[in-house]
Amino acid sequence: MGRKSIAEIRREEFATAAFEVLSLHGMKGTTLQRVAEHTGVSKASVLHYFPNKQNLIESAMRRANATLRKEAVAFMALASTPWERFYAIIEANFSPTTFRAEVAHGWIAMCAEVPHNPQFQRLQNAIYHRLHSNLLSAFKQTGIGDDAAEEVSHTVSLLIDGLWMRCGLQIGGLNREDAMAQIESVITRTFSNDAERQAAQSKMSALAGAFTANRG
Amino acid sequence: MGRKSIAEIRREEFATAAFEVLSLHGMKGTTLQRVAEHTGVSKASVLHYFPNKQNLIESAMRRANATLRKEAVAFMALASTPWERFYAIIEANFSPTTFRAEVAHGWIAMCAEVPHNPQFQRLQNAIYHRLHSNLLSAFKQTGIGDDAAEEVSHTVSLLIDGLWMRCGLQIGGLNREDAMAQIESVITRTFSNDAERQAAQSKMSALAGAFTANRG
DNA sequence: CAGTTTATTGACCTGCGGGTCAGTAAATTT
DNA sequence: AAATTTACTGACCCGCAGGTCAATAAACTG
């Protein structure tokens, strides 16, 4: 079971290609022609696997999201304490493989479509709620109190959104280290800079580094 | 001097109309036809005042930005202390007239184009730098130290970006009060909750309220 | 009032992108 | 090997959006 049909594999190829084209050329520049070229087939071939362009792009976004989620789950599995879980979330959101300008472009392009596409709206909502509930459960278990946990979760998720935005707009040559430092600065101002937290941070940082290195 | 020619007035009309259409229908849905309809003229008339669509939309964004900036300057003029200046910035960024989902849609639509349009890139950069330098100068004068001021300025501008994003995506039914409360929560966690700051906040809140009420 | 500029428009052209379709080649099935 | 399903393609159609243009109406100028 779980064996993928050849058609399913092809669909995934096209979906990832579509996301890449979207990242490179924006929503307007993402034509069936270009997606086809990008995979070396004809336009009609793409339509053989997808009923229409909208469906293709929706699949592309779902696929991209699934990839991110997979990595996040892998990181999460390496964490055993609340603070480690928190830093697992951070590492996942700023993983070198995903926190890149091109990916951010794709993401922002989708955000711009959210008001006119219920599918995108649902996806965006799901992404947001997953992030929030992950953050919340981690913070709650640090023992800072439920209300504080709620507040900090909101703050962190807002910061993440802002940082991705800025990554896409390429403001201030933001890289992943800067981004994580920003989050860390807020966390440090909020919580006392205890040793346990610092240990969790460096542990997850090292694990994440090893994890991504194993695949390059 | 400063007298506007009738043609200039017309151009502004079309530009604001274009921004409204952009907010309602997104970049793809913003056609010359629709902009024309929205002002009750023919498509060709729009092209009489603008060389092409791109120029029209760029003018629309510049115009929208100019409007926001005008309001920000007005708020700023009402502030006399550093903390009042800070809250003037906040009030301006979350003014009821501007912090609305439709406006956020327009803004996000522009952000999505930034990678493919140098004009938008420049505009976005200008907006960001103005916000940052305003925040920075206000924070520096509160006497928290230059390094801390830099850090907090970054944090606040990131939060503002994130909040506008979330406003556009309409996640969690975010309204302007929630947004400002989020910022306040971070500020409170960072600084001691002194009376001077609280006074500044309520003063600017009242002034901003009076200011906007005077024009409805 | 004659002449000139300006405003506005409908008709038209062009290119392009989404989507259909019938046909061909390749793979699978029986 | 024959039949049938699947993969892929070029040719074609349609609609639409951007942009041009010539014509008309209105405003301004001397």
Image (tube, coloured by chain):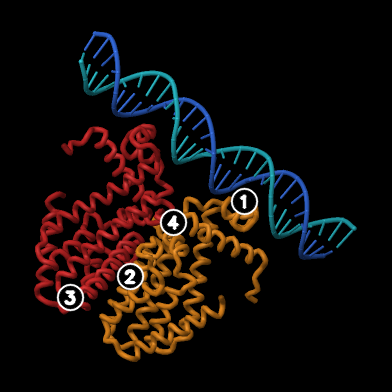
Chain colours: A orange, B red, C blue, D cyan
Q: Which mark is residue A117?
A: 4
Structural distance between the alpha carbons of marks 3 and 4: 45 Å
Q: Which mark is residue A43?
A: 1
Q: Where is residue D9 drawn, in percent x and y?
A: 69, 50
Q: Could you tell which of marks 1 and 4 lies nearer the N-terminus?
A: 1
The chain holding disc 3 is: B
Quadrant (top left, top right, bottom left, bottom right) of the C terminus of chain A: bottom right
Between disc 2 and disc 3, the foreground one is 3
Between disc 1 and disc 3, the foreground one is 3
Structural distance between the alpha carbons of marks 4 and 2: 23 Å
Which quadrant of the view contains residue B163?
A: bottom left
Both on one chain, marks 2 and 3?
A: no
Both on one chain, marks 3 and 4?
A: no
Q: What residue would you read off at disc 3?
A: B144
Q: Say which residue appears at 30% left-offset and 48% top-offset.
A: B62
Q: Secondary structure at mark 4?
A: loop
Name which residue type carries label 2. Answer: Leu
Structural distance between the alpha carbons of marks 1 and 2: 39 Å
Q: Nearer the viewer, residue A203 or B1?
A: B1
Q: What residue would you read off at disc 2?
A: A158
Number of other residues with Cα within 10 Å of mark 3, as a class: few under 14, some 14 to 19, many 20 or more: few
Between disc 4 and disc 2, the foreground one is 2
Q: Say which residue appears at 39% left-offset and 55% top-offset.
A: B114
Quadrant (top left, top right, bottom left, bottom right) of the N terminus of chain A: bottom right
Q: Could you tell which of marks 4 and 2 lies nearer the N-terminus?
A: 4
Q: Nearer the viewer, residue D30 or B29?
A: D30
Structural distance between the alpha carbons of marks 1 and 3: 60 Å
Marks 1/2 in contact by CB < 8 Å: the verdict is no
Q: Where is residue A204 drawn, in percent x and y?
A: 43, 84
Name which residue type carries label 4. Answer: Asn
